[in-house]
Image (cartoon, grey):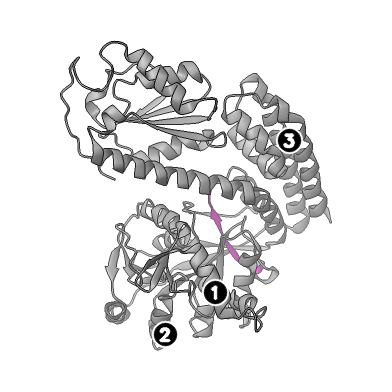
Amino acid sequence: MTYPLSPVILSPRSPFHSRYDPVAEAERFAASSIGAKKPSAIVTIGPAYDYLGESLKRRLPHSLVLAVQLSSEFRGMECQGSDFRWYPDSTMSLEDFLFDRLFGSFDGGVAILEWRPCTSRFPEMSKAALDDVKRALDRCASERATIRYWGRRWFTNAAANTLAIGKTAFLESPGTQAALVVCSGPSAEEVLNGIREIPSASRPMIVCVSSALAACVWRSVVPDFVVATDPGFWGARHLDRAFPCDDDQHPIIAAPLTASLPAAARSLVLPLDTALPYEAGFLGALDCVALRCRPSGTVSGTALSLALTATTGPVFVCGLDLASSDIVSHASPSAFDPYVDGFSDRLKPSYSKRWERGISQFPVRSGRFRIGRPYSVYSSEIGRMGFTRSVTRIAGSPVRLDSMIELEAEGFMKTLRAEACRGGVKVLVGRHDAPGSGERAERVRGIVLSWRERAICALESCGNGSLDRDGLSMAEAFGGRACAGFMADIARGGTGGAFLQEALLATRRNAELITGGLER
């Protein structure tokens, strides 16, 4: 969101605070707004001279206070209360500023306070700021929920994949041919039907997300790369469709080690580095060259990163609908289909089950499309990726992405035929043998034990004021819900003492279970 730099005339008579006792005014507002609550973070909208921030810090000294100013004219004239401030002329967007600052202080709750004398003076900017606050909170909530739910699975997947992968792939040199990223939205079907009619030698480099693999294979479109990031059950099920063909026709699986991979997919993997703190250790155990991909909250963003790295030619993307087409959310066929249709009966037909899922997850209707909160988070994440060059999206839904050029499917096929005539060099992929299984097992065991000790140390040292966020994240991965109370108390500025023993016990127990499972 771009904010106008509206000047405001500041004077002692500016109607932002009481002329008689602005400190008492701020104290009363803080008391009535916060009450007995103890949020770990407070965001103030339009605090003006920021008597409010000063009052909040006196009331809750351990809470993080962030001030969102609606005019840059207030800079340098505020009271010394808020921990951090954002101004309309800041180089960082408000959403990114809030996400970066709130991420470590989210677990104890966040309070949003509007200073009405100022927000009423800047109504449009105030509304825009609140929208950005909502998006930042959605990102924080989504990120924290993902880490809390998947943390342990990520770690165990990384360990298991390191033990099983015997050979890795790497990009020796990028190609120059056009690339098509196939996402799993319903509009991908039309594009894949067109690609099917093109001879294999004239097709672009195809990078497919795992959830669109079944739709590709069913149409005899074998991708060059399949990108998989899902750490759960469906991650492996989507990839089952990659291996009914001969060995030399297998697509290369590009995946972080945290992904769930079936046994057949582990024969050749192009490892992706998503910058998780323990990922470097496991990649080192394989002695491999990993491709750095910025995590974007969705596999589509990772696939786009791979395509932009693998070729210098034009990059197109289809199926990135960010909406469901009525009750159809994925290109057909999909790995989900047998699980929906296979458990249907006369009283619960598959159509009704799809309808119930569609209206619950995607409640907002736009013509024949439906939009929901998960897609809103994905579109926001992809919009912030900052592509190194232009990406053309083949239109398939009413959701627009400002970071991409829009093109209709018919126009894409014409462009693709022109690119086929131009030709291009294919990406060169190398292979590398991993160390022997015994050596990998010894390395993995060392990694698990070192992170267990770091997690325990991070929990025990919080009471001394030392904060190892990577270690605490690992403790949360090992300990799961048993660490939730501890993390919330730390976010509020506490020491976590009342929850420490439960967190330590769960961390030690689950780390031992992981180690024992690897040994078996």
Q: Which residue is mark 2?
A: 193
Disc 3: which residue: 503
* Relative vertical location of residue 439 with respect to residue 168 in this rendering, above or below: above
Classify the position of the C terminus by image quarter.
bottom right
Q: CA distance from mark 1 to mark 3?
A: 40 Å
Task: Kindly state the secondary structure of the residue where label 2 is placed.
Answer: helix
| Residue at screen point 60% across, 77% down | 241
Q: Amino acid at mark 2?
A: Asn
Question: Label 1 to label 2, Cα distance in Å?
Answer: 24 Å
Closer to the camera, 46 or 222?
Answer: 46
Instruction: Give the side of residue 91 with respect to residue 371, left or right.
Output: left
Q: Secondary structure at mark 1?
A: helix
Query: Callout 3, which amino acid?
Result: Ala
Instruction: Provide the residue designation for mark 1.
Output: 354
Between residues 469 and 494, which one lies in front from this camera angle? 494
Magenta span includes 270: yes
Q: Amino acid at mark 1?
A: Arg
